[in-house]
Image (tube, rainbow, N blue to C red):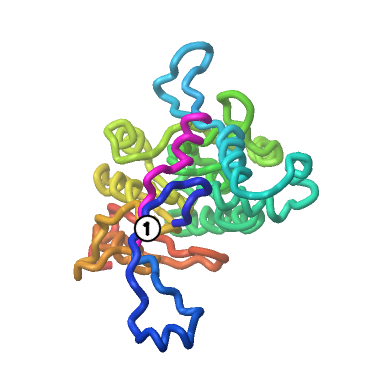
C-alpha cells in the first residue's frame, strides 16, 4: 500500500556497501543503504477520519451509523497534502480548473474506492453485475436482499437493481453528499425509477468481522464486493461463517496491514496472485473466474450449494 501524505514512519535499512571502497568510488550512484521494511508510527488518515465522522443525526447519537463525510475527509487530506507541496494559496483555490489531472491524482491516491477512471469503474460494475446474473440466474436475485460491501457510490448496486430488481444495501462508511444522507448520482436514480427498480439503501458503517456485521450478512441472500480493499478477507470469512453466497473481486493486498497472512508454505502474502491463492484455500467451494476489464479482474465466488469437487 502507498504511504499517506504526512505520515511519520520508521525505516529499517540495510547496508548496500558490499564492495570495496575503491568500487564504491567508481560508482557514486550506488546507494549506501536500501530500505528493508517500513512501518507507520503516525497515520494522518486516522486524524482525517476523526475529523470527518458524522456521529450525530438530528442532535442524537445514531448507533447504527458510523458515517464519514467524504468531502470533509478529502478536505483534511488535501490540507495535509498542501503542507508538503509548494503551491501558493491563490493557485490552490483554482486548482481543480487549472490542473485537473493533478487534482484527480491526489483524490485517487487518497480515495480507498479509487481504482481507475470513472468510466472504467462504471464498466466494471456493469460487467460484474451481468456476470453474477448469468452465473446464478436473474430469478436468484429478484426481490432479494443483497449486501454490497465497501460499495462506494453504489455503481454495482445500481446495476444489480437495474438488471435483476434486487434489493441492494451498500455498506460503506463514506457519506457522499451534504449532511448525513448519502446522495446518489441523479442520473442513476432516474434510470432505476424508469426501470421500476428500487434505489439502494446505504448504511454508513465499516465492515469488519463482528457480530453486528455477521447479523447483517445472515439476513441477506447474497454479498458482493467490487475492489473492497481492506475488508476483502472479512467479506469472505463472513460468507463462510454464515453460509451465505458471495462474490468478490479482490484488489489491493495491503501486505503491511496484514503481516499475519501466510501461505501453506509459510511465505507471507505479498503479491496479488498470492492473495488470490490465500483466499481460495479457505474453502474448496470457492471458485475463480476472470472478467475482461482493465485492472484487477479475478472473481472469487463462494456458492454453498456447489459440489466441492466441481
Residue 142: x and y, percent?
48, 42
Q: Residue at x 49, y 80 (%)?
A: 28
Residue that label 1 marks: 11
* Quadrant location, the C terminus: bottom left
Is any part of residue 243 visible from this angle? yes
* Quadrant location, the N terminus: bottom left
Query: Is 257 on the left or on the right of 94, as rendered?
Result: left
Q: Residue at x 41, y 54 (%)?
A: 248
Residue 38: x and y, percent?
36, 57
Q: Residue at x 58, y 54 (%)?
A: 126
Is any part of residue 169 visible from this angle? no
Q: Quadrant of residue 211?
A: top left
Q: Residue at x 35, y 51 (%)?
A: 257
| 184 or 205, nearer to the observer | 205
| 281 or 291, nearer to the observer | 281
Q: Quadrant of residue 220?
A: top left
Q: Which portion, as a residue range, is magenta?
A: 37-52
Q: Is residue 38 magenta?
A: yes
Residue farthest to the left?
265
Residue 308: x and y, percent?
23, 63
Amino acid at each position: 500500500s502507498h504511504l499517506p501524505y504526512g505520515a511519520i514512519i520508521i525505516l529499517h535499512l540495510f547496508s548496500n556497501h558490499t564492495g570495496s571502497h575503491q568500487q564504491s568510488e567508481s560508482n557514486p550512484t550506488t546507494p549506501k543503504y536500501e530500505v528493508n521494511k517500513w512501518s507507520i508510527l503516525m497515520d494522518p488518515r486516522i486524524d482525517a477520519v476523526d475529523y470527518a465522522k458524522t456521529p450525530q443525526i438530528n442532535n442524537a447519537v445514531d448507533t447504527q451509523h458510523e458515517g464519514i463525510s467524504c468531502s470533509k475527509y478529502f478536505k483534511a487530506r488535501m490540507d495535509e497534502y498542501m503542507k508538503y507541496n509548494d503551491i501558493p494559496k491563490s493557485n490552490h483555490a483554482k486548482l481543480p480548473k487549472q490542473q485537473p489531472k493533478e487534482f484527480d491524482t491526489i483524490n485517487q491516491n487518497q480515495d480507498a474506492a479509487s481504482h481507475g477512471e470513472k468510466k472504467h469503474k462504471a464498466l466494471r460494475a456493469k460487467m460484474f453485475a451481468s456476470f453474477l446474473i448469468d452465473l446464478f440466474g436473474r430469478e436468484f436475485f429478484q426481490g432479494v436482499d443483497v449486501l454490497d460491501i465497501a460499495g462506494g457510490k453504489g455503481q454495482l448496486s445500481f446495476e444489480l437493481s437495474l438488471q435483476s430488481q434486487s434489493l441492494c444495501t451498500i455498506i460503506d462508511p463514506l457519506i457522499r453528499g451534504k449532511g448525513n444522507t448519502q446522495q446518489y448520482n441523479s442520473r442513476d436514480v432516474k434510470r432505476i425509477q424508469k426501470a421500476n427498480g428500487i434505489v439502494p439503501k446505504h448504511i454508513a458503517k465499516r465492515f469488519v468481522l463482528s457480530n453486528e456485521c455477521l447479523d447483517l450478512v445472515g439476513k441477506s441472500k447474497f454479498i458482493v464486493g467490487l475492489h473492497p480493499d481492506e475488508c476483502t478477507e472479512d467479506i469472505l470469512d463472513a460468507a463462510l461463517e454464515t453460509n451465505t453466497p458471495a462474490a468478490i473481486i479482490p484488489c489491493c493486498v495491503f501486505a503491511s496491514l496484514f503481516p499475519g497472512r501466510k501461505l501453506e508454505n509459510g511465505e507471507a502474502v505479498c503479491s496479488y496472485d498470492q492473495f488470490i491463492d490465500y483466499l481460495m484455500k479457505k474453502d474448496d467451494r470457492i471458485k475463480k473466474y476472470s472478467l475482461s476489464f482493465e485492472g484487477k479482474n479475478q472473481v472469487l465466488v463462494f456458492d454453498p450449494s456447489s459440489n466441492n469437487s466441481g
